């Protein structure tokens, strides 16, 4: 009996190849779902991919560690790159989705030189050329610590959207502010793309999966359970009737105090904000809120990693 060759998605390395792939789908009248990622894929990413497989005729995933969203002091060089394994895992999703015979059609691996024809400096002062900013939303929360982060995200997402022109694009609530920035970008730049925001994929201890978790040793990962517990505590207090955000924040931060005092965690922010404008709230109304945090955690070897998480109430 002839052995069935394992499935592999089409790998697209160039802009020209992506444009050709997209044209074929257009001519075939197919809907296209798109999942932009930075690779080092995990179940959180596959959760997005599976939603695309279920809703579109064709699914394309991009893997690109986008330099323009990293500050010169950040971890661009160390960011985990596992492209071969990523592709194998995407291929293995074939046919797995709720009995549907579906598969990831294509994986786009953009090259920095093509995405940034003028080259890309990490220092914004030295940059030249065209960039995209979503003013307002980008300056809140994450924007305070990472002032040019969303400019980098908005720029690369715009380029990818122009190339892939998906019917739907999938983003994770894990990066809640990013999903709002992308929705605003699509609205303001008149893209005809539906943005689908998928809920957060967590491990059995409640830790939100993240490619940066790969930096962390077991003892540190263990302590991180506390981050989700803190957010859940805030949510539960709110559900039991507490709407004063100062009271909520104080109780939540108290949960991390032990780790802050021993020096293994540093709170960048724990915040309660409006779900659409990200305005800081004093009182939570029936509109609900987003509880979010960014925490620096220190490995036993002293290496520091910044992690984010959130819950919606
Ligand atoms: P990244 O590769 O980190 O840029 O993530 C690519 C996409 O996957 C983004 O839209 C993220 O929000 C989403 N994502 C990352 N981690 C998770 C997770 N644990 N659950 C759901 N979505 C996620």
Image (spheres, rainbow, N blue to C red):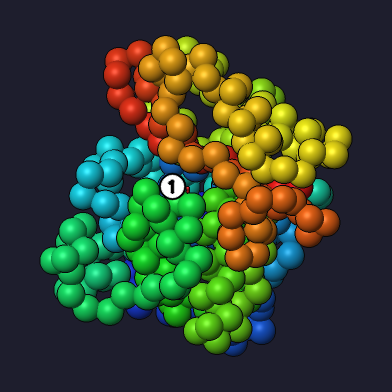
The quarter of the displayed image where residue 215 is located: top left
Please give the residue where the numbered disc 1 appears in the rendered image: 39
Q: Taking 273 as reference, is 295 above or below it?
A: above
Residue drawn at x 57%, y 44% as measured from the top left: 271
Report the front residue among 105 and 201.
Answer: 201
Quarter where residue 158 is shown = bottom left
Residue 134 position within the rendered picture, expressed as x and y whole percent measured from the top left = 45, 72
Is residue 92 found left or right of 144 in the rendered image?
right
Q: In the image, 313: left or right of 42?
A: right
Residue lying furthest left in this view? 126
Q: Quadrant of the N terminus?
A: top right
Vertical position of residue 201 compared to residue 17: above or below: above
Q: Residue reaching furthest right?
A: 240
Whether residue 23 is visible: no
Q: Is residue 86 left or right of residue 82?
A: right
Residue at 86% across, 35% down: 240
Which residue is pictured at 64% across the width and 39% down the height?
Answer: 246
From this view, report whether residue 172 is shown above or below residue 297.
below
The number of numbered badges drawn on the structure is 1
Q: Residue at x 22, y 78 (%)?
A: 129
Q: Quick check: can you spot residue 78?
A: yes
Indicate the secondary structure of the residue bearing disc 1.
Answer: loop
Q: Any atom of ligand 1 within 8 Å of the CB at mark 1? A: yes
- Please state the horizontal and vertical placement of residue 302, each as a whole percent of the image: 29, 19
Density class for disc 1 (Cα within 10 Å; few <14, some 14-19, many ≥20) is: many
Q: Position of residue 20 (x, y in %)?
A: 44, 79
The x, y position of residue 118, in whole percent, is: 17, 73
């Amino acid at each position: 009996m002839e052995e069935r060759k394992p499935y592999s998605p089409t790998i697209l390395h160039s802009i020209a190849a992506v444009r050709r792939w997209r044209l074929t789908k257009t001519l075939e009248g197919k809907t296209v779902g798109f999942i932009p990622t930075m690779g080092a894929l995990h179940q959180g990413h596959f959760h997005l991919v599976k939603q695309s497989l279920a809703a579109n005729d064709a699914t394309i995933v991009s893997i690109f560690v986008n330099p323009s969203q990293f500050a010169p002091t950040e971890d661009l060089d160390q960011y985990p790159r596992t492209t071969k394994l990523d592709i194998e895992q995407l291929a293995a999703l074939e046919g797995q989705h709720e009995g549907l015979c579906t598969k990831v059609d294509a994986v786009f691996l953009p090259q920095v030189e093509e995405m940034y024809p003028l080259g890309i400096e990490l220092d914004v002062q030295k940059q030249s050329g065209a960039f995209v900013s979503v003013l307002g939303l980008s300056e809140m929360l994450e924007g305070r610590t990472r002032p040019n982060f969303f400019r980098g995200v908005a720029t690369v997402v715009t380029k990818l959207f122009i190339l892939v022109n998906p019917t739907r694009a999938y983003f994770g609530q894990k990066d809640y502010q990013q999903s709002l920035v992308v929705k605003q970008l699509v609205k303001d730049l008149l893209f005809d793309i539906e943005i689908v925001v998928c809920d957060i994929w967590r491990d059995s201890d409640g830790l939100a999966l993240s490619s940066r978790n790969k930096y962390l040793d077991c003892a540190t990962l263990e302590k991180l359970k506390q981050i989700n517990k803190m957010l859940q505590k805030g949510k539960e207090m709110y559900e039991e009737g507490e709407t004063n955000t100062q009271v909520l924040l104080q109780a939540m931060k108290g949960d991390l105090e032990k780790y802050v005092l021993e020096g293994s965690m540093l709170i960048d922010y724990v915040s309660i904000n409006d779900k659409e404008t990200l305005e800081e709230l004093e009182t939570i109304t029936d509109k609900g809120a987003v509880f979010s945090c960014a925490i620096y955690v220190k490995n036993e070897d002293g290496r520091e990693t910044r992690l984010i998480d959130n819950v919606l109430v």
